[in-house]
Amino acid sequence: MSIVAPPIVNKTTVKPFRSVCYDNNFVTSQGIFLGDDPLSFSLPLLLLEVSLIFVVSNALHFVLKPLGQSKVVAQILTGMLFGSTGFGRSLAFRRTVFPARATFILDTISMLSFILFLFSTGVKTDLGLLKKPGSRAIAVGAVGSLLPLFVSLSLFLPLHQSFPDDLWRGQFIFSLATRLSLSSFPVISSALDEHGLLNSDLGRMAVSAALITDVCNWGISSIITAVALVLKANSPEIAAATVGCFTFFTLFVIFVARPLALRMVRRTRIGSLMKQGGFVALIVGALLSALFTEVFGYHATLGPIMLGLALPGGMPIGATLTERLESFLFGIFLPIYLALAGYRTDITDLGNLKTWGSLELLVMICFFGKLTGSILAARHFKIPLKDAFILGLMTNIKGIVEVSYLNVKGDSELATAQHFSVLMISIVVITAVTMPLIKYLYDPNVRYVARKRRTIEHMKSGSDFRILAAVHVEDDVPPLLDLLDALHPHPSSPHNLHILHLTELAGRAASVLRPHRLRPRDTSNPTASDRITAAFRHFAEERPEGSILLQPFVAASPTSTMYNDVCSLALQRKARLVLLPFRRQPPGLSQAVLDHAPCSVAVLVAGAAATCAKTNLTVERVAVVFLGGKDDREALAIAGRMAEGGVEVTVVRVRGRGEPSAVEDEEAVAGVRRRAGVEYVESVVGDGEETVGVVRGMGERFDLVVVGRRKGLEGDEVTKGMEEWSQCPELGVLGDMLASAEISGRVAILVVQQQEWAAGNACQVEYGVADEGARDGLINKMAASV
């Protein structure tokens, strides 16, 4: 490789370029047995480089993941390992594995993957979040961006002469301060999703704030680029052509590309991915948009992001891109983009101390300025200081967008090799420090710790019964309606019913939790949420007026953190009971809700009673298996409400031989026995096998069997030995036995867990408590009442 000296044109220099000479037929090798050196040919060398980057980056991520590090850090470190900082210090290694002729090919592939990444990000960006972003997100985004920019420029401008001249070339210092002051929506959403914080309260706020600043930045940058091209034009005709091309492309995207995409969406069956032809059209459109903007003087990344923002996300376009594009292209080729940036980073050549110190000063000012601005904005809205600090860390996460910025500035030579290395190291350090800190400081589940009794057992007579029913698929609806009917909603004891339709986040970059927008009944293409809401609305309308207040919601989030939506809404709406249909998919959902719910939880295993939609049957005969404990008392309280509505309730009490009964258990049983229509049966057993014998025949006599989960009481005398055969721990040993195929096919099972009460540990409060003193007073008051 040789660098050709820049020629002099009108006393100005043009950008130097690399000139690499090699045989253009050296693509595929004939093999080592015919005397060829495979690494002298482009294809074998490319395969080796891609494989090395893929294997080493994933191995590094495997090692660093327990330390809270993201994939971005591992991928950049992989490049540094192969570059001048690591093995690349060996000239033989660089000439053999990463020669200049091969990095050109890698550059092209990585840039192509980055273009498609921006297009996919644009599609998955839900601009609807900007309609009602919330004052907190606006304040965090605005103050967190403007404060560091103002402070940095206020320091650097008056002291212009004190800083190196190369920082002022092409206004690089202004551009860098702006980029470091902004938050990046793709970077923050991806990092939080990777660490399971995307649908946490602070995660949602950080993503919304980043989206606001990013959209504003995209718009302003497009205008600035257009103005810069006009100013560089040598004639009015060229200036007019520049503006005209940009205007034409914008109008084409809005009035041609978007309507065509909407037509493709309407022609795709609900819940299905796009056909192959539609997918190919999307990719070709993204590439052509990049070509158009590049040809007419704009950067190739502008077209794909504009086109992506104009297209509808979610199903089916966004989901199709995620399913067919991201796992392969972004899992293998996009890491090359970050690895090449790390490869160009030379930690041994950071320039003179003055340049290095000036850049680090700017980085630190922007980091702490952004952190301070986010904290001030959050504290204005009474967000606790710790959470405000975590929010500030989230908005400071750096990643591929900042790397792309440095690549562009490096290619245009506004940033020297030393600038590039210093700033790349800063990006790695900031990301490597912030993510572990966030993981260490922030546990979104802390806010679900019980601060007030929200149980059925302790509910006052006549108060409204707040229920949250979580629905994953439409098949969950009939059994839930049966159960709700058995709970006897009535104007004298109304049900405040919240329906939450849980959907997996598909084709979106940000999670969603919002009220369901009721659409016209005669809609020709209803969604699953529409049909679920319509079923519950019909159920509510058939009950006496004032019996049910229905409030439907929709949530879209990653499967692994879907429970957060359930618990968050239950906390926000002060629910006393979460109804959760039992499903093995998504895995872990039931267990996570049981572990973190801020109220009581009832898991419904559907059986013969779940047939009201087909045969108009209702729950008429209910059995409660009472072994003792708070979960069983909660199950008894639910059955007592059913008895008030005329349901035949049989309490089957199972005692251990010589085992004393708790006072609370005796009082709960006595209270239910006094109700009309309640039958009481008592059995004495010696072990779990005898308990199984007592309850095994219930499938023939009852429509619904209610049991307590009995958390913490496994292995006592009445269930001894049963835990060895348990396959579904979220149902408890008795619920798991009843849910076996032999019994559950004939009867529905309701497994109840009473709210976990730990007021003494409730150290984090909901947003809205005025200050630390109010928080401490609240905790002390609750502790005194226990």
Image (cartoon, helix red, strand yellow):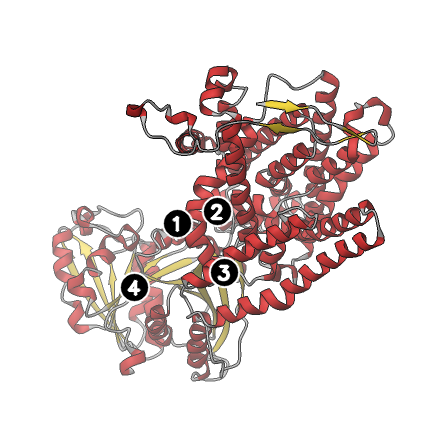
Type of amino acid under label 2 = Asn
Question: Residue at position x 23%, y 56% from top?
Answer: 736
- Circle 3 SS class: helix
Disc 1 from disc 2: Cα separation: 9 Å
* Rendered view: 704 above or below 615: above
Tag in front: 2 or 3: 3
Type of amino acid under label 3 = Ala
Q: Which residue is label 1 attached to? A: 595
- Cβ–Cβ under 8 Å for marks 4 and 2: no
Disc 2 from disc 3: Cα separation: 43 Å
Q: Which residue is label 4 attached to? A: 669
* Rendered view: 318 above or below 391: below
Query: Percent from the top left, x then y, of residue 612?
Result: 30, 79
Query: Percent from the top left, x then y, of residue 779?
Result: 56, 46
Question: Can you tell which mark lies on residue 445?
Answer: 2
Disc 4 from disc 3: Cα separation: 67 Å
For marks 4 and 1 on the same chain, the one whose residue lies earlier in the sequence: 1
Residue 375 in view in this figure: yes
Query: Percent from the top left, x then y, of residue 110?
Result: 52, 39
For marks 4 and 2 on the same chain, the one whose residue lies earlier in the sequence: 2
